[in-house]
Image: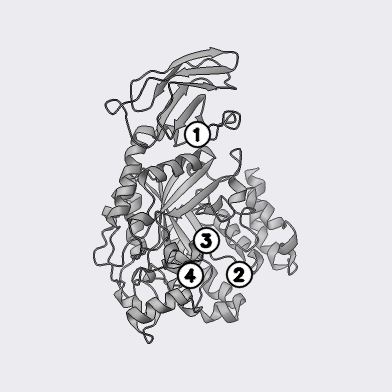
Amino acid sequence: MKLLLSRLLLGISVFVCFALPGFAEEKHPAEWEAIDARPVPQWFLDAKFGIFIHWGVYSVPAWGPLPKDGAANIYECYSEHYWNRLESGNPLFVRHHSETYGENFKYPDFAESFKCEMFKPGEWAKIFRESGAKYVVLTSKHHDGYALWPSEFSPGWNASDTGPRRDLLGEITKAVKAEGLKMGYYYSLLEWNNPLYREDIGRYVDTHMLPQMRELVEKYEPEIFWPDGEWDHLSSTLKSPEFLAWLYGESPVKDTVVVNDRWGKETRGKHGGFYTTEYDLVHSDNVKDSQIAHPWEECRGIGHSFGYNKNESLEDYSTSEELVHMLVEKVAKGGNFLLNVGPTADGRIPVIMQQRLADIGKWLKVNGDAIYGTRPWGGARENAADSVYYTAKGGDLYVIFTKIPPESFELKGIEQAPSSASILGTDIAVGCEYSDDVLKLEIPALTLENSPCDYAWAIKISGCL
């Protein structure tokens, strides 16, 4: 199978050159069949929790409206869309910009204020490791086209030529890998204000986008390639199958790299690697079923925005409890959870974000066995209950309660009597009574004195599957 896949991938670029225009619009093209046959690497399926980083020139104005300000939807809250909102005449952004900076101050003028003078990559990487995350995805280039590395394809509009005058991406990558985490890059396929993108998409793809993506891969060897901004064009126009054929067949990360599904306006939830949801909104219908087999990932900010938004207050941030519950829910449904931090323009991760990550890390130190390397349990639907989630690993079942566990709990569809059961993080044994395929758990009461953690509690039932 592996040899056949390699041959198919190597032949993709030849096929694409002769593909009929519009063929990708209605049919399932041969090149996508080969690409989709490539399995998602095991490390990603086991990792479960990652950190997203949105950081760039937009971190200088660091502003977006909130729902209470009249934002029409979650996307209008995104501070990283600042330039586009100005250019499109969004009244909330235009009014804020005019009152704060004046009408003659243009978005590119923010670049020199993106100094990152307090950026300490080693401290960032330690925060990420202690959060329990297993991988990091950095916005190498967002929709404004500003690159966080010294890209030869973005001269004068990158972090090496302006602002911090540093290879931010390279520094983060080195620090993250030193902490033992996987490193990946978000990459915007579109650039709002690039004349080539607006006027000649073919030249943009051939002379800017594709060579820049290849530069990024060859120089920094990411273990995740996370494109976005695919909604304007078909994957055939963006030549995504050609790039993926090279990425999977010839690149230095061909055996380990993981990609998402944002490769063209027809590909989300259909093609690529893992499927993506965003604030539980984008293509969430693809992953609502707890029995979904295809790898997927939910991404979201701790607040309403991905980029840092100084307009947000405490009430706009998810609590640590809410975030732990999100992680549990996504993993129980077979997904990963990519939680975003938005650093400030001077290079700090806001303290409230650090606190949320620290709390998740404390919870995972106790309950990580119920998260990492697990898969959805086939009996979850039959045993559905409020505030209860299930994961499985080998012959073991984990029951995760997002409220204090009841004194007794019954499970159906259990294959055999367990060898033991206990509350993770404690030596507290859980009583088991097994008959036919039904297992009744007798759960000792948790108190402030004996509770191993906050927010959610996991019971490991060994050898029952």
Please name the residue that numbered disc 3 is placed on: 227
**Mark before the other along the chain sequence, 1 or 2:** 2
**Mark before the other along the chain sequence, 3 or 4:** 4
Q: Label 2 neighbourhood size at 10 Å, few (<14), some (14-19), many (20+)?
A: few
Q: In 3D space, how far apart are the residues under numbered discs 2 and 4 (Cα atoms)?
A: 12 Å
Quarter occupied by the N terminus: top right
**Mark before the other along the chain sequence, 1 or 3:** 3
Counting from the top left corner in percent of width and height, residue 361 is at 34, 42
Q: Can residue 370 be seen in this view?
A: yes
Image disc number at residue 143: 4
> Do residues under tags 1 and 2 come within 8 Å of each other at their CB atoms?
no
**Left/right of residue 379 with respect to residue 303 in the rendered view:** right
Using the image, determine if residue 408 lies above or below residue 144: above
Amino acid type of disc 1? Tyr
Q: Label 1 neighbourhood size at 10 Å, few (<14), some (14-19), many (20+)?
A: many
Amino acid type of disc 4? His
